[in-house]
Image (tube, rainbow, N blue to C red):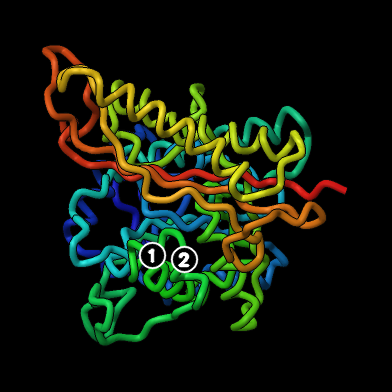
Amino acid sequence: MSRLVTGVRFFSTAASTMLADATSAARSAGQPSSFQVFRDVPQLRQLRRQLLKNDRSVGFVPTMGALHGGHLSLIREAARENTDIFISIFVNPTQFGVNEDLSSYPRTWDADVEKLEKMNEELAKAAASSGSTTGRISALFAPTSKVMYPISPPSSEVDGDGSFVTITPISKKLEGASRPVFFRGVATVCMKLFNAVTPDRVYFGQKDVQQTVIIKRMVQDFLIDTEVRIVGTARGADGLAMSSRNVYLGDRRRAVGLTIYEALRDADEAYRSGKTSRADILGAARSVTDRVLAEQQALSPSERALFEVDYISLADPDTLDELDVVDRSKGAVLSAALRMAPLEETKPGEQCGLGDGKVPVRLIDNLILPPQH
């Protein structure tokens, strides 16, 4: 039975804290919810079965909340291809290592619910003006850790016990080299979410390119009856790839953080000009990061934003194996990660972002080098 809680509908014995969040979210939205909010799997599956009986399709957008324009672009794409859209918000503990601060991940439930409400309004208006059939957000799945990991608390230890999905060797490359449990956690939670939702299609952003390769491999290897859709990277007006963690950057670190995109673009230009060797393509990127870092190091602590290059990669688009030479008939994936250090000194009135510039921020980005025949 559904239960109406100040405009947001919950279908389970929701914890009191989440009920308070839901009430606050509904008040902030200022109107009854246009979608159902689920805290447990059985009731979500009940809705899914009903949709199947009515020949309706489900597009699924899994998130960890702190929704931004990139998430909304995934929802718009899902609305073009499905009658119903399911969203999940779950900050997954198993993809955070023991030395990573799970508690620092931004949690913005009220704002997230309001954005989803506005998105449904946008979709309804678009359908009315065009006379076309456009999907709507029907369900928001916001489970607890106990729902997602019912038998035992999840482990973040590399050799920890638990039921995990591992996709190797892809998960050990790039991001996985410095975050050894990250993709194990991603694959595990996605497998659980796919089993709970059984979507016709699932939507991911190109920004997390390694994640997209791993999810495609998982769906193929485990015979999951779901189509994986990859949507182009959503960027801010300045070109920075949208990420929930960008709220921690502030003006100074955001400006310097654009180095990652500038470096990738220079490498992309080298490829498009005819270069195919790793030295030429990545050399173009490295010249950008080296120059900007030297410029920042020459500034005073109150003016600079320091960073460390984690990696710049030129890899095969299917295996993510590093390439010495790009096969022009196949193309490549160009990706990078920067670690923005906390600000050493701040100035009065400076916009330093959430956490006052004290939270380190890891930026990732990529460009696809297309085949050239």
In depth, the one of 33 and 247 nearer the eye is 247
- With 198 as the anchor, is 107 left or right in this view? left
Q: Position of residue 335 (x, y in %)?
A: 53, 48
* Element type at mark 1: helix
**Residue flagged by tag 2: what amino acid is it?**
Lys
Residue pictured at 37% horizontal, 54% vertical: 64
Spatial separation of the CA atoms under disc 1 and disc 2 = 5 Å
Q: Which of the two residues, 247 or 183, is positioned nearer the viewer here?
A: 183
Q: Residues within 10 Å of mark 1 (few under 14, many from 20)?
A: few
Along the line of sight, which residue is nearer the eye, 126 or 245?
Answer: 245
Answer with left or right where residue 297 lies relative to residue 285. left
User: How many neighbours does mark 2 have within 10 angstroms: few (below 14), some (14-19), or many (20 or more)?
Assistant: some
Three-letter amino acid code at the position of disc 1: Ala
The vertical placement of 341 against 49, above or below, is above
Where does the image place residue 234, in percent across and percent down from the top left? 55, 37
Q: Secondary structure at mark 2?
A: loop
Q: Pointer 2: what residue?
A: 173
Q: Position of residue 239 (x, y in %)?
A: 51, 28
Residue 345, above or below 94: above
Can see residue 7? no
> With respect to residue 153, does 280 lie above or below?
above
Q: Are marks 1 and 2 in contact (CB under 8 Å)?
A: yes
- Where is mark 1, residue-wise? 177
| Quadrant of the frame with the N terminus | bottom left
How many labels, in total? Answer: 2
Q: Residue at x 55, y 68 (%)?
A: 215
At x 44% / y 70%, what residue is drawn?
172
Residue 254: which disc? none
